[in-house]
Amino acid sequence: MLAPGIPADLARFAIGFDHRDRARVHQLWDLVLETERWSEGPLTDEFELAWATWNGLPAVAFNGWTGAALAALDWAGVKGETVLCPSNTFMATPLAIQHAGASVAFVDCNREDLCMSFDDLERKVAEHRPKAVFLVHIGGHIAFDSERIAELCRAEGILLLEDCAHAHGADWNGRRPGTYGDAGIWSFAATKTVSTGEGGMLVSRHADAVEHARLFRNYGKPDYALHGLNFRINEFTAAVGVVQTERLDEIVRWKNEQAALHVPNRLPLPDGMTSGLYKTIVFEPIERSTGKVYDEPCHRVLGHHVDLPNSDWVAQNHWCVPLYYRP
């Protein structure tokens, strides 16, 4: 199939930043310079509040996805345990599990949404009796089996962590990613729908998980009873996060309007679901693609000998249409 008729300027790579916001960013950076608070200051608090308001859960900012993920895994107490993880994800997910001292076991995905399969998860829960499950929202939309997965984890006493690194702006009948499980972990790396260059966020409905995350990102200060490390976000990065969060809904509306005009054959979503369109996914070859979301499943990268046919199929049979935010 030929590439969809994306206008050339929309197909040219661009960071998801609205340059009308440059003056606002500079204003906030000047405030940082004037107050002499370069870390652990009011803009970190403001970014957390803005994200919590959008996401619907208390939020803790980090300098990257990894710190937030390790904080969640440490809170979940996975050391020496097994954590289930989809193979169709970025290697960050299983690597974080391993660095937290847990064993990772892989779960297959669905072909329809590229996300974790409830049916295979149910089998793997019975086989591995995991301490936690890592559900990953792939490509910008919410995993179609999220509610069933959350119900299974609740019934089995398994902690559910959500990797929301792709899911900025996603919504399913008013519900946001990160609210299905016990904690959600976000990335604000450079190519995300909204970005701070580098950055992360943890959200949770559990007050003790939020407090654990705050201590974990700063070595466990002041009493060091919790052995964290330095995962603090700086105030300049937090300032960009404040501005980007303010612009998020507009960016997602724009991307969905353009996708509807130019990519009518993209991955279909359930009724009531909106994707943030981190990736614009199609299931037919196109001449111009930004590549695959992931072209090699993690179980193959790590040499796990397990049969995950849908993960192998997805790696070969989807493509990503170039569509970048240019207001």
Image (cartoon, grey):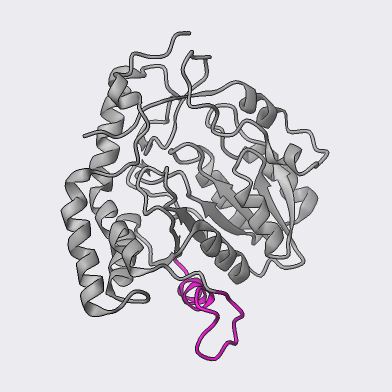
Q: Is residue 152 visible?
A: no
Q: Is residue 19 above or below residue 231?
A: above
Image quadrant of residue 7?
top left
**Residue under the point 33% across and 69% down:** 235
Q: Which residues are magenta?
A: 205-229
Residue at left 54%, top 40%?
Answer: 145
On-image quarter of the C terminus: top left
Question: With 288 as the anchor, is 13 left or right in this view?
Answer: left
At a point 21% along the width and 76% down the height, the residue shown is 34
- The quarter of the displayed image where residue 256 is located: top left
Give the answer, above or below, for where 92 lies relative to 173: below
Identified at 60% across, 87% down, the residue is: 225
Q: Is residue 207 magenta?
A: yes
Position in image of residue 25 (x %, y %): 22, 58
Q: Is residue 136 visible?
A: yes
The x and y percentages for residue 15 are: 35, 41
Q: Quadrant of residue 80?
A: bottom right
> Is residue 223 or residue 13 the one in the foreground?
13
Q: Nearer the viewer, residue 238 or 298?
A: 238
